[in-house]
């Protein structure tokens, strides 16, 4: 049994946790939910030894014995395994080396590479299944997708014979099939007596997997309830009404035109991750790119923002003007902005302040004679903080200390000073709570009402249904269908994404010509 007793934690200017007491029983999956900033990550970092004893109030007890963790290694030895939302892999090391880090098999004092790979493969197979055979275990993990990196983290945690395994937003980048396999593994481990703390903003997963749910709000434990209870009012203090606005008359004014876009595979030049893709986005329209992992959604957005350095062919026009997209600088000049999938690695400078991150995209407009106009920059940053309801103690607060939802608002907000004509959104609500998600949806609707064009790539099908005016479904880099209006449903998207390619719609055929 794991006990968190009267846990409290204060950061400068912020009370993160106050008097939180929780018990996790053997063979239980305890859901842990709350809005971003509610204290979930702080609580599991205390359990996992990230914050050492003495830096917080209360105590952690395992099987009745009070622990005095001074490191994550202490927690691991005591039987606590954590898969953090922020990936903790070593990018330059191989798949096998990351999986076996700290447990490398040796022979005569030297790492046995053959045995290392064999054990790594054995560790990953229960999570990845037959697809394990396709992996090059000597390849560095920085060549893998976010979804595959997350899969490695999960496999590594499950390989530990831990008393409690904490899964923090584990399914955000995973496909439905991978999520189903993960759930099977969790249920099997639960049946053998292992315990889990499961953190997710996807409340349908909480209902499907968890035995009980602990709800945090503003650093305090609100209640521990059945997963069948309506959690949103407990998390937010009020109900969230997430209703799609009634669409207006479709515009006929094209903002973005993409014709015959192809992107070569980064390591296999004979393959294309995007293959002859053509589509358009009208003024005030949201066009979603949907499809399974590896279908080409992120590759398309990266190419449109000039991030694909080679192997890109096709033409792109913005407001009727040809755009040369050899670099992000070219894309920004053409009126294109990009909110990437991995906000921490590509969207923010974590060591800089809220103001500095909000200002960085528009520095050219905030400088005079080569020097930043401090008053103008502060005024612009304050405007964005108020407009987007960014919760931060001050403009000078380091972005790394903010919740995921507030970080994501900053990633979006930094572009608004430039008033981009096209906004590319890649998994815009990944790891974001229900309140921040609703705010981001409202922001997208405000932008389209002003005439901006939005291209959305998302694996969250309810999100696609909620936001998209049209959906282009991709499979293996090619468009296999287009949906609009009432035809946009999770079922219709999935049928196109994984089923037999249907006859292309009239709109899609016209887009190819």
Image (cartoon, rainbow, N blue to C red):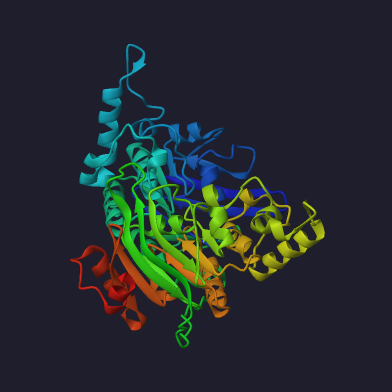
Task: Report x, y in % for residue 36.
Answer: 55, 59
Name the side, left or right, on which 230 lies relative to 42.
Answer: left
Note whether 88 is above or below 403 in the view shown.
above
Q: Is residue 372 rendered to the left or right of residue 261? A: right
For image coordinates 44% across by 39% down, the residue present is 80
The tally of labels here is 0
In the rendered image, is residue 96 in sight? yes
For this orientation, the residue located farthest to the bottom is: 249
Q: Quadrant of the N terminus?
A: top left
Residue 218 in percent (x, y) is at 61, 61
Residue 393, image x, y percentages:
71, 57
- For the C terminus, which image quadrant? bottom left
Residue 260 position by quadrant: bottom left
**Residue 404 in view (yes/no):** no
Q: Report the residue that reaches farthest toward the left.
A: 500
Near-viewer residue (300 or 122): 300
**Eyeballing the image, is 123 above or below 387?**
above
Question: Could you say where residue 57 lies in the image, as x and y percent from the top left?
Answer: 63, 45
Quadrant in the rendering for residue 238: bottom right
Q: Residue at x 45, y 37 (%)?
A: 91
């Amino acid at each position: 049994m794991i006990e968190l007793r009267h846990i409290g934690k204060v950061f400068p200017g912020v009370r993160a946790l106050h008097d939180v007491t929780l018990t996790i029983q053997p063979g239980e999956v305890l859901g842990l939910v709350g809005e971003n900033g509610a204290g979930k990550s702080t609580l599991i970092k205390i359990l996992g030894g990230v914050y050492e004893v003495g830096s917080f109030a209360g105590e952690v007890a395992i099987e009745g014995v009070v622990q005095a963790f001074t490191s994550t290694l202490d927690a691991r030895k005591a039987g606590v395994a954590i898969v953090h939302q922020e990936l903790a892999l070593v990018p330059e090391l191989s798949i096998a080396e990351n999986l076996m880090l700290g447990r490398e098999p040796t022979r005569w004092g030297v790492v046995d590479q053959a045995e290392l790979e064999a054990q790594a493969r054995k560790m990953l197979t229960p999570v990845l299944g037959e697809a394990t055979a396709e992996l090059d275990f000597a390849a560095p993990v920085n060549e893998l997708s976010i979804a595959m990196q997350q899969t490695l983290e999960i496999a590594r945690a499950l390989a530990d014979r831990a008393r409690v395994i904490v899964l923090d937003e584990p399914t955000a980048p995973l496909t439905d099939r991978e999520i189903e396999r993960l759930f099977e593994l969790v249920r099997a481990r639960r049946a053998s007596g292992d315990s889990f703390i499961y953190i997710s903003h996807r409340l349908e997963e909480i209902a499907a997997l968890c035995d009980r749910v602990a709800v945090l709000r503003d650093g305090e434990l609100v209640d521990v309830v059945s997963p069948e209870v309506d959690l949103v009012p407990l998390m937010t203090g009020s109900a969230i009404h997430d209703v799609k606005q009634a669409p207006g008359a479709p515009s006929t004014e094209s903002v973005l035109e993409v014709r015959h876009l192809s992107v070569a595979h980064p390591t296999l030049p004979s393959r294309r991750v995007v293959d002859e893709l053509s589509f358009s986005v009208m003024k005030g329209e949201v066009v979603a790119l949907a499809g399974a992992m590896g279908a080409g959604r992120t590759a398309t957005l990266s190419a449109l923002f000039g991030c694909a350095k080679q192997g890109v062919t096709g033409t792109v026009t913005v407001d009727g003007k040809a755009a040369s997209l050899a670099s992000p600088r070219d894309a920004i000049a053409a009126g294109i902005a990009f909110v990437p999938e991995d906000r921490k690695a590509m969207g923010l400078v974590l060591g800089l302040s809220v103001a500095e991150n909000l200002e960085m995209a528009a520095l050219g407009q905030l400088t005079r004679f080569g020097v930043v106009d401090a008053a103008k920059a502060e005024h612009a940053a304050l405007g964005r903080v108020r407009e987007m309801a960014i919760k931060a103690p001050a403009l000078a607060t380091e972005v790394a200390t903010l919740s995921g939802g507030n970080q994501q608002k900053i990633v979006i907000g930094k572009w608004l000073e430039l008033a981009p004509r096209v906004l590319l959104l890649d998994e815009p609500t990944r790891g974001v709570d229900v309140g921040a998600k609703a705010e981001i949806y409202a922001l997208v609707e405000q932008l389209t009402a002003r005439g901006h064009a939005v291209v959305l790539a998302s694996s969250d099908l309810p999100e696609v249904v909620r936001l998209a005016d049209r959906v282009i479904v991709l499979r293996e880099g090619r468009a296999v269908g287009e949906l609009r209006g009432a035809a946009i449903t999770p079922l219709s998207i999935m049928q196109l994404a994984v089923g037999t390619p249907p006859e292309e719609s009239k709109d899609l055929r016209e887009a190819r010509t």
